[in-house]
Image: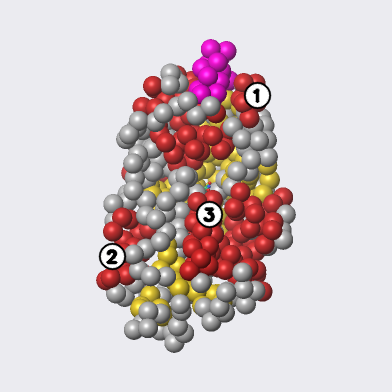
Amino acid sequence: MSTNKKVVVIGGGWAGLSAASELCHRGIKVDLFESNEYLGGRARSITIDDLELDNGPHLLLGAYSETLRLITKYFHRSANEYFEEQPLCLNIDNTKSKNYKSFYLSGSGLSSLIRAKGLSLREKLSMARFLLRLKRRAIKVLDNETVEQLLRRENQNGNLCALLWHPLCISAMNTPPHKACGRTFLNVVSDALLQTKLESRFLLPKKPLSKTFPEAASVFIKKHGGNIHTRKTVKLQTQADEQFCVSGELEKYTHAIIASSPHQITNCFTDNELSNAAIAITSNFKYEPICSIYLQYSHETNIQKKMVAYGSPNERWVFDKSYLSPGLICVVLSSSGPHTELTQEDLAETIEQELRDCFGYTTPSWKKVITEKRATFSCVPDLERPPQKTSVKNLYLAGDYTYGRYPATLESAVRSGVNAAKLVLEDM
Ligand SMILES: Cc1cc2nc3c(=O)[nH]c(=O)nc-3n(C[C@H](O)[C@H](O)[C@H](O)COP(=O)(O)OP(=O)(O)OC[C@H]3O[C@@H](n4cnc5c(N)ncnc54)[C@H](O)[C@@H]3O)c2cc1C
């Protein structure tokens, strides 16, 4: 392989960092540019009053094989250093309110699903039939079928939807069941619930997000000769000799990887030919928000699991964030719904009241709402996601939105980054 090759990566989210790590690992020279002063993109920490909060709690699966591979094999860190394993707990089981039904799943796989608390025998049998059909690849998804339609066709009704499938759909796909893509949902269910015990683990960060993958990737890239330039918003330009350069810099590059969010692509190019190649498909994308409400209580909070869900139809997930500050709670509301019409103050008030009703919490010393308006693309049926190879020679895309089996997740970002690097290497 010739060594006069140099790659520019635009974007320092998990996709861009993965692409740069993979290339540096293979001895290729890389310059990575990131607009913000921090790395991590949509999965990062923000410092507020000396406290490092995440822009939103993130959940990983044991099946996130590429993310875990990079962490252990390249960055030489143990996954346990960053994440802790959690059972899935949907709908509150330690609530004061009698209105909530509870579903609690400890462990993973079909057998633990059957042992799960909160469902009747008939519901468990119906769920088992569905999962066995999925395992045998006997479920055929119809064109344009939403999660709601698919579940109805598979006789997944009542409590099964309210306590299990709908919360799982909203949290994993950030898209409500009546809009979400049935086919992608089956990929998530299969990887979350039907794989080996190790793969079906739920993993929650036990450090601020920026101190996990982004920090480890940054150390790795620099150690292997790569350069990371933060606070640099750049645009890609082509040169007469088919090489690339970026605005304001003299360096020339043989290959380029654009690792921005889909809505930022237009701002990554100076020239129309390049941007047209990349944005034609993403201009059809619609986006879903995620609101995270942090509340600081003075007492030890009494959530027995690190993560529980309550409420319907826009399920709220409650995360215990006491590892950041004792008594800190974060409530997450995925996708759009009545809550997105509220002001931040009213939303914080509403959540405070709900926590008082459900958990008996008193008044928090402070509360803070973080809204990511374009947290993920809306994962609807038959959405055309762009391939990573563009029509421009040596130009590739990376990001959670490119073609893949998952909705917008950390793993889809990492897989696309690694794959973009592999495509570049094949060119060399
Ligand atoms: C609140 C929230 C909660 C989430 N929860 C989960 C979860 O529990 N589990 C999960 O798997 N996923 C979750 N996600 C989704 C996950 O965070 C994203 O899928 C993933 O971070 C996307 O990474 P990316 O690298 O593709 O894009 P991004 O993170 O958007 O990175 C793109 C980067 O490119 C930079 N950039 C853009 N244009 C330029 C330019 N011209 N010059 C320089 N830099 C540029 C941007 O500043 C940005 O840092 C969540 C997302 C949010 C917002």
Q: Which residue is mark 2?
A: 276
Q: Is residue 382 highlighted in magenta? A: no
Give the residue type at disc 2.
Asn
Q: Start and end of the magenta stretch?
A: 118-133
Pointer 3 residue Cβ closer than 8 Å to ligand 1: no
Q: Residue at x 45, y 64 (%)?
A: 259
Determine which quarter of the picture holds residue 145. Answer: top left
Q: Which residue is mark 1?
A: 111
Q: Which residue is mark 3?
A: 415
Give the residue type at disc 1.
Ser
As measured in the structure, the alpha-carbon distance from the residue carrying label 3 to the one carrying label 2 is: 24 Å
Check if mark 3's residue and mark 2's residue have beta carbons within 8 Å: no
Quadrant holding the N terminus: bottom right
Q: Position of residue 385 (x, y in %)?
A: 37, 51
| Nearer-the-camera pick, 421 or 115 | 421
Q: Is residue 121 highlighted in magenta? A: yes
Whichever of callouts 1 and 3 sits on the residue coming sooner in the sequence is 1
